[in-house]
Image: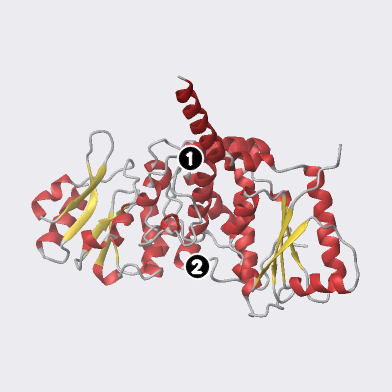
Amino acid sequence: MEELRKKAAELLQSGEVQMVIGYEEGTRHPRPCFISSADDAAKLIYDDRCTGNLAVYLTHKELIGGQKIAITASYFALRSILRLLTEHQIQLDKLVVLTVSAEKEVIQFATTDDITAYLQTAPVPAREDDKALIEKLNAMSPAERWEFWSAELSKCFKCYACRAACPMCYCTKCIVEENRPQWIQPWASTLANIEWHINRAMHMTGRCADCGACGAACPLGLPIHLLSHQIVQEVTDNFALDVNQAVSGDNALSTFKPEDKENFIR
Amino acid sequence: MSEFEPKIVAFVCNWCTYAGADLTGTSRIKYASNVKIVRFPCTGRIDFMLLLKAFAEGADGIIVSGCHPNDCHYTSGNFHARRRWVIFRGLLNFMGIDVNRIQFSWVSAAEGAKWADVVNSTVTAVRELGPYTQYRKAADYLAQQDQSIIDGQEAMIIK
């Protein structure tokens, strides 16, 4: 942690970056912090509790402006950064990407290849609760799954915290605000909620970092991140693209292989 | 009691399946009349939201059909569509939406008989599955809300 603070202070002092996006101690959980003076670098923390995906702030133009930014990225945030770079939403020369490895070592990435290599070797943070719920859902019959999801999603009141927390949801006009035609009714109702969450998950195909930030942001604690997780799984199973390959390559749905396999088309 | 007649919506591409369905007619092959055909320029144009809307608006089954791989009028529309269907179908299944009610198929302009077969078998399968009330229950939410508002107003007038 000391090493990270020293690194951040150095970067700010030397003027290499104008802001560091990292985590500080919150009332209950670590929270994001935005540091623009070397004196504040002592606030920075980084440990296993820092799971929020800070890459979401990188596309906020009102926050970033033309500044060069340093970011302490979690494992999943690194995937999101790769994806944002692939989609030309951020530039690597305007970014200092830092992470803290499992051995508490501060790593600064110079190229996207370095990030990819790190993602392949570093352990993926485990989420045991999700695993248990996914197993439970997969053991259910389709009718039971429908009961589960329509009951869960009927609670959603469309605050769009899931969208705000997602680094990939940077569209200036989202499909839910589209009203010609109005694909999804803007009010909260079971059907409109289901349609919204299907759209959100579908638009994440091949782009989702599987960080779970959408589910963590949900004020009702709905397990909506499992929908995009399922899509990650489908992409891996059907297109032989693991999530690290998918985020750094061409969009899974804008590309194809003539030999793609399926078993349901007559 | 009369037998349940499913409502089937078919989303088809202009160049293959629509022409194929035309051939079914000109060849005088009889097939189930439950199907309503919606013509699209290409399977690549068939947005997954259209399928969800069809279910919400009362469809019991859906057929999505277009050109065979490598036969797309626009070269690659059906390849892109195939990828989208794979993902979409997986997600629907995970959410418990009945994927057995959606029949995907490739029907070329020469396959009039295959089109009749696809429609007939889909109608038979959906007839066995029964009306898709499960999904429409979610869609009925608004109607219920309106009703409860009307009921509420009546209650106030009576007071």
Q: Is residue B113 left or right of residue A150?
A: right
Q: Residue A25, image x and y in percent?
A: 22, 39
Residue at the spot 26% in from the left edge and 43% down from the top edge: A31
Q: Chain of mark 1?
A: A
**Which is nearer the eye, B41 or B2?**
B2
Q: Residues within 10 Å of mark 1 (few under 14, many from 20)?
A: some
Residue situated in front as seen by the camera: A239 or A205: A205
Is B144 displayed left or right of A222 in the figure? right
* Mark 2 lies on residue: A251
Relative horizontal placement of residue A194, taking residue A44 as reference (left or right): right
Q: Amino acid at mark 1?
A: Pro
Numbered circle sitting on residue A223 = 1
Question: Looking at the image, is A159 positioned above or below residue B144?
Answer: below
Coordinates of residue A226 in the picture (x, y in percent) = 51, 45
Which is more N-terminal, label 2 or label 1? 1
Q: Is residue B124 above or below residue A65?
A: above
Q: Quadrant of residue B84?
A: bottom right
Circles 1 and 2, Cβ within 8 Å, touching? The answer is no
Residue situated furthest top in the rendering: B159
Say which element carries label 1. loop
Is disc 2 placed on a helix, strand or loop? loop
Residue A187, horizontal then vertical, whole percent: 44, 45
Q: CA distance from mark 1 to mark 2?
A: 25 Å
Relative image position of residue A171 (x, y in whole percent)? 38, 62
Along the line of sight, the residue nearer the viewer: A134 or A161: A161
Tag 2: amino acid:
Asn
Q: Bin the neighbour count of mark 2 within 10 Å (Cα to Cα): few under 14, some 14-19, many 20 and up.
A: some
Label disc, if present, on residue A35 of the rendered structure: none
